[in-house]
Image (tube, rainbow, N blue to C red):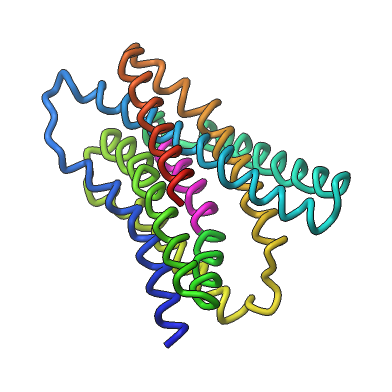
Amino acid sequence: MHFIGALLVSTIAGLSTILGGLVIFFKFKEENINKFIVLALAFSLAIMIGISITDLIPESSYILLLEYGIPKGFIYAFIAFIIGVLLIKYLNKLMNKSSIKNDLYKLGLLNMLALILHNFPEGIATFMSSYKNMSIGIKLAIAIALHNIPEGISIAVPIYYATKSKSKALMRTFLSAIAEPLGAIIAFIFLSKFITNTFISLVLIFVAGIMITLAIEIILPKAKKYNYAKYLSIGIVLGFVLVLINYFLF
């Protein structure tokens, strides 16, 4: 029963990503579509940066400092972060060399890859927490669900408006969502003896490097190209407000 309950909590947290993807069913007038895209991109980049600097980096760095001490802890955190930065730069370079011409579609795919990497260790953390203490696991799952919803938006919106295909947008959002319970299952079957708080912390700082770089170097320039500064600002403010709510409540 402990396994089933923990897996259910992790699955619900992960599948909340799909709720964000449902925004593609909203109907917008033709002249408002680009405004919505800018709003969604700005909102998602604020979530990515905000979650990284208020949650992933501080908590993970603290664990590394406790484990290795100040010099080594900082060095390991920095290396993990830089590897994340370099990976997303490399993936973006590969995307630009690919036969895919639509920039919005490339962005959606990069978001999907980044968030699969993000959701996988979160699934491990949620499952392990719930397996040991259900109340702590549920609290963690709620916090994760709150930022998974806008992350779903960051995948579905660019892919849908690039392809006009709801099925493609939702399928790629689902792939990101399913990474969370998949991480939980793999953790239980294969890695439960080896996964430590230190390991998860390194992975999450690595993911923070990916998300911050993706947000600043790829999503922000794309959103700016539409020349809707007002909607860009609104999206960023709304994203950071949600991050602060998540931070103070959970």
Q: Between 30 and 236, which is closer to the camera in this rendering?
A: 236
Residue 97 pos. (x, y %): 54, 33
**Residue shown at 22% from the left, 38% from the top:** 164
**Residue shown at 56% from the left, 60% from the top:** 121
**Residue shown at 22% from the left, 42% from the top:** 23
Above or below: residue 31 compared with residue 130: above
The extreme bottom residue here reads: 1
Residue 166 pos. (x, y %): 22, 46
Above or below: residue 194 compared with residue 233: below
Q: Is residue 192 magenta?
A: no
Above or below: residue 105 compared with residue 198: above
State which quadrant residue 18 falls in: bottom left
Residue 20 lies left or right of residue 210; in this view the side is: left
The extreme front residue here reads: 248
Range covered by the magenta-colored residues? 106-119
The chief SS type of the magenta part is helix
State which quadrant residue 91 falls in: top right
The extreme right residue here reads: 71
Residue 23 lies left or right of residue 70; in this view the side is: left
Residue 224 pos. (x, y %): 41, 16
